[in-house]
Amino acid sequence: MDHRHVLRALSGLLIVLFVAMISSTVVSVALPQIIGSLDGTQSQYTWVVTATLLASTASTPIWGKLADLFSKKLLLQIAIGLFVVSSVACGFAQSTEQLIAFRAVQGLGMGALQVLVQVIIAAMISPKERGRYNGYLGGVMAVATVGGPLLGGFITDASWLGWRWCFFVAVPFTLLASVILGRTLHLAEVRRPDTKVDYLGATLIAAGVSLLLLWVTFVGDDFDWLSWQTAAMVGGSALILGAAVLVESRVKEPVVPLHVVRRRDPALAIVASLAVGMAMFGGAVFLGQYFQIGRGYSPTEAGLLTIPLMAGVLVSSTVAGRLVSRTGKVKPFIVTGVVVLAAGFLGLSFIDHETSLVMVSLGMLGVGVGVGMSMQNLVLVLQNTVPLSEIGAASGAITFFRSLGGTMGVSVLGAVLAHQVSSKITDGLVKLGIDPAASGSGGSTLNIAAMPPQVQEIVRAAYGDATGHIFLISAGIAVVGVLASLFLTPTELRDSVDL
C-alpha cells in the first residue's frame, strides 16, 4: 500500500486503538466513585481492573495466532462487535460483581483490538518505516491517556451524565471506526485452509496464567504465603504452564512460537516488556486513587493532575518514533526510556499525602517519558526478527507478556496497597479510641463520603502514605527492564515488510 492508502486505513486503525486505550483511562479516574456508588471494596476495586487485564492477557496470543491463519480484517470487525456489546453491558451493571464479569468480556475485545491493530500495521509497513507511524500510534495512545482521565472526570462530575457514560462513550467511536475500516482497509489475505488452531495450547496458557493471578490476588489476605492453598495454586499453575510449553513445542501451528521467543533479542524484548508493563500498569492504575482518596481532589481535578504523565508519553513516543525511522536504530531509545522510567518511579516512591504536587508531577513526567520511548519500540525489536507469516503470533506473544506483566503488577501492587491501607487505618482508628470493626472503615469500603470527618482524614492519610510503597516496588521492577534492554543486540531495522 502506498503512503496515501496507508494513511486512510491507518485513520480507522488509530480510532480503534484510541477506543481500546480510552476505555481504560476514562474508567481509571471514575473507579473510586464507581466502586463507592456500588458499595464495593478495595479488593473489588483491584478486580475491576484485573479482570479486564486478565481476559485481555489470556486471549492476546490466541488473537495474534488467528491473525496469521484467517482474515485480519474479519477478525478486527468481530473484535469491534464484542467490544461494543460488552461496553454497553458494563454501563448497565448494577453491582460490582456484574461489573467485574462484564469488564472481563470487555477485556477479550480490548486484547483483540490492541494486537490486531499492531498486526495489520506490520502487514502494511516495513519495520524501518514503522518507526514514523509508531509516532502516530504513540500520539494516539497519549491523547487517549491524557484525554481519558479528563473526559472520565468530566463525565463523572456532570450530574446529567454520571459514571455509566464512561462505558457508553466508547461505543460511537468504535462504530465509526468499523465503517471507516470497512471502506479503506484492503489487505492481501493468504488463505491457509490446511492449518489448525492450537486450542489446547491456548486453553492451557489461559488456565495457567489465570490460576497464578488468582493466587497473587488472594495470598496474604485469604490465606498465608506459606500454606497448602499457595502450594496447590502455584504448583498447579507451574504444571499447567509446563504442559502448555510441551504442547507448544510439538504442534504444527503453536499459539506462542517457541522458536521465536527462544532467540536472544526477542527473549530480551519480552522480558523488558514484561517489566515495563508490570511497572506502568501497576503504578499508573493507582494514581487516580491517590489523587482522589489520598489528596481529596475531584475526578476532573485528578484527570488534570495526571497530564504530566500523559504529556511525557505523547512527546517522547512521537520524537523517538521519528528518530528511529531516521536512524534505523532502536536500542538507544529503549535503554534510555527504561532508565528514565525507573528513575520516575523512584521519585514517586517518596510521596505521601502531603507531598508537593510539583514533585509528584516530575515523577509522573519521568514515567511517561520512559513508557513513550520504550513500549512500542520493544514490539518493533521482535517484529524486526520474524517473517510476515509469523508477525501475528510474534506480536501476540510480546503483547501477551506485556499484558501479563501489567495484570500481575496490578494484582501484586493492589494487594500490597490494600494491606498497607488496612494496617494504617486500623492504627489511626485505635489512636482515636475507635473500634475498627465497629466503625466499618478498616479499609473495607471506598465510600469515603459516608464516613465521619475524623475517619475520613485517617483514610485519606492512609491511602496517600501507602501509595509511595507501591511505586518503590514499581521502580525495582523497572530495573529488571533496564538490565534486559542493555543486553539487546544493536541491530539495524529492515526496510522491507517481509524478511
Image: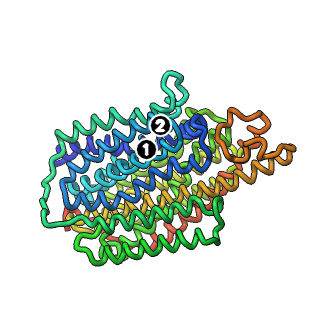
Q: Do we see residue 228 in this rendering?
A: yes
Q: Position of residue 96 (x, y in %)?
A: 53, 42
Q: Nearer the viewer, residue 335 or 259?
A: 259
Q: Which mark is residue 241?
A: none
Q: Which secondary structure, mark 2?
A: loop
Circle 2/circle 1 CB separation < 8 Å: yes
Q: Of 11 and 189, which appears nearest the observer?
A: 189
Colour scheme of this structure image?
rainbow
> What type is the residue that disc 1 sits on?
Phe
Please state the horizontal and vertical placement of residue 229, each as a whole percent of the image: 58, 68
In this rendering, the answer to whether 232 lies above or below 81 is below
- Residue type highlighted by circle 2: Ala
As drawn, is 133 to the left or to the right of 139? left
Q: Residue at x 56, y 50 (%)?
A: 46
Residue 29 visible, this orientation:
no
> Who comes first in sequence, dot 2 or dot 1?
2
Q: Residue 223: x, y in percent?
A: 64, 64
Label 2 belongs to which residue? 93
Q: Write down the residue under mark 1.
A: 102
Mark 1 falls on what kind of element?
helix
Neighbours of disc 1 within 10 Å: few (<14), some (14-19), many (20+): many
Residue drawn at 64 percent across, 54 percent down: 417
The quarter holding residue 65 reads bottom left
* Percent position of residue 103, x then y: 44, 45
